[in-house]
Image (cartoon, coloured by chain):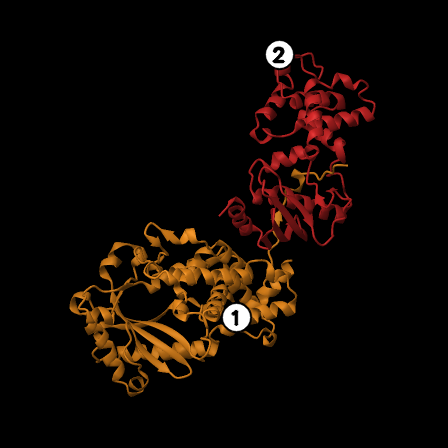
Amino acid sequence: MNLIERQFVDLRKKYQYLYKRNEQDSTIIAGTILFDNNNIKDKYDIEIDISTDYPKMIPSVCETKGKIPKDWHHNGKYFCFETPFRVWEIFRKQETLLNFIDGLVVPYLASYSYFKKTGDSSMEHAHGARGVLDDYKKCFNIKDDLLAFKLLKLLAEGAYRGHISCPCGSGKKLRKCHGKCIQTIILDNRFKNYDFMQDYLRIGILLKEDDIISDPSEYTTKNVLNYLERIKKNPQQKWGY
Amino acid sequence: MYEKAIYIAGILNSIAEDLDIPESKYLEAKNRYEAVGNWLGKEGTALSKYCPEIYPQGSFRLGTVVKPIKKDEYDIDLVCFLNELRKEDTTQAGLKQMVGDRLKEYDRYKEILDKEGRRCWTLEYANEFHMDILPSIADDELRAKDVLHKDAILITDKEMIENNDINWPKSNPKGYANWFFTKQTESFQTFKKEIAESMKVDIEDVPDYQVKTPLQRAIQILKRHRDIFFLNNNEKNKPISIIITTLSANLYLGQDNVFNAIYDILNNINKEMLIGKEGYYIRNPASFDENFADKWNENSELPKAFFNWIDNAKNVFSSNILLKKDEIQIAKVLNESLGSSVDKIAPQKIKPTPVYIKTNNIKSTQPWQYK
């Protein structure tokens, strides 16, 4: 049995109405998820597309009966469970299909059922880079867009130096201020291969558009230019979260 | 998609019900073998001092009976256990003869007694039952060893008798049945409760034989599929029922419908798990040294036939093909592979009800979107 087959056995112990088939370059798990979220009972027919790169590549999921409109947190036909950062945080905690469904798919579906029933969308992220930035602000426990962006730069550049003064402007040294938070993320195995540069660039563009950054050259370091060069050569890497 | 799965499960349930022994026949068989027990143990006769006891074993005991394809006769396997006879005081030949002689003392039994079998005496109730009676005594050595063997028995074997082999063959049918029922304890209670509710009676008033779990139904379907598959295909290589039953019970995960149970059983059978240090190995869960697959190691045609059959069953039940078909196509596939006639089957009494998975962690994530 290969990894997917083994994980599928565990998955079916809980989700009995999911069935597997093999296609040329991927494994498809299709079926119905039935859940009961604090008495909101609902069911969705879904298809999970697992590439041969799994678990390096996180599976994509779409719905097959069109209950959820495509303008509700979708990327093309696939669900957007969370910001890429959080998707990694949740999935990489335990790279199994069961954790994937429990931690990402069911909460996503339950959120839609909740939204449909109550009209309350306060539990959803803002779209695009704004949502990602909000997430980092929460993560760094900081309210200012630009300062969060500067902290993210440390993650994107992957160069942590504790003695520099903290970008948040507290006047303290980094290691005595936001350094702890940054280092926790750097040391977290889940984010070892996470593409922070991508988030950094996207938020950079957003802040430029919002006139929060007036001089982009200040943020366009050598690493950034190298990264852009790489993407130009391999366009498919561009948004390969 | 779950609607389709439940629909197929409903049909499979009906087919299995049709293959099963009907309640009236079940009760009749029970009366018949109890009568045999009374005859064997009648006070003042040769056997009575050994306190004989008759109890069912095999599919009749496990609730996995499948009607044979061509005849209208059910196989009922019985153990005739002589409580008070010790191994030291008898021989295999003596035991076998003692039971046979007592049966023959009754004209009716003498009339329907088949010629002596390898291990059993057989009563042929034409067009009704084929009752195998297995003479046995306690395996005192094994019983003393551990609780797994507390009901272990010694049985007789005609070939061994002819070869003057003094070793007694061993068996443990009660131990096996106990093991089997532990594999479905939870589903058994759930389904028993459902029956009680649907019949509006107390759960204690539902007899156990009326309860059929998805595991029992799955075994019936798989055995029937095997019977059909091997019908014109080297019948002598047909995998034995105890192998199908053991593997199914081991792979049953408590699924709430028969389709899902079969799907997982077939999906999770693989060659590697059946290979031990010395070839194919399927352990009798009620005995440490019995290998149900021992014949596979003497005849390579047997495992080959088994895996051919499994591949065929996978194609029918676990390849998603069935889920994509419409109702007419589903009926066609099932009729072909199970020799049934689905359109004649009445709607089943109890529909499988899917379980809604409880969740409460939607606050742990927030949906997002690229643009």
Q: Nearer the viewer, mark 1 or mark 2?
A: 1
A231 relative to A191 in the view: left or right: right
- Residue A107, by quadrant, is top right
Residue B81, x across and y down, in percent: 28, 70
Which residue type does callout 2 highlight? His
B206 relative to A108 in the view: left or right: left
Residue B337, x across and y down, in percent: 53, 69
| Residue closer to the observer: B102 or A15 | A15
**Residue B200 appears in the picture as rendered:** no
Which residue type does callout 1 highlight? Leu
| Residue closer to the observer: B142 or A89 | A89
Chain B tint as drawn: orange
Considering the numbered disc 2 on the image, is that residue within a helix, a strand or a loop? loop
Residue at position x 38%, y 61% in the image: B178
Tell which subunit mark 2 falls on: A
Residue at position x 49%, y 60% in the image: B311
Q: Is residue A72 above or below residue B306?
A: above
How far apart are the two marked residues, 1 and 2, measured between alpha carbons?
A: 75 Å
Q: Which mark is residue B338?
A: 1
Q: Are marks 1 and 2 in contact (CB under 8 Å)?
A: no
Which chain did the image draw in red? A
* Mark 1, other Cα within 10 Å: few <14 / some 14–19 / many ≥20: many
Residue for badge 2: A163
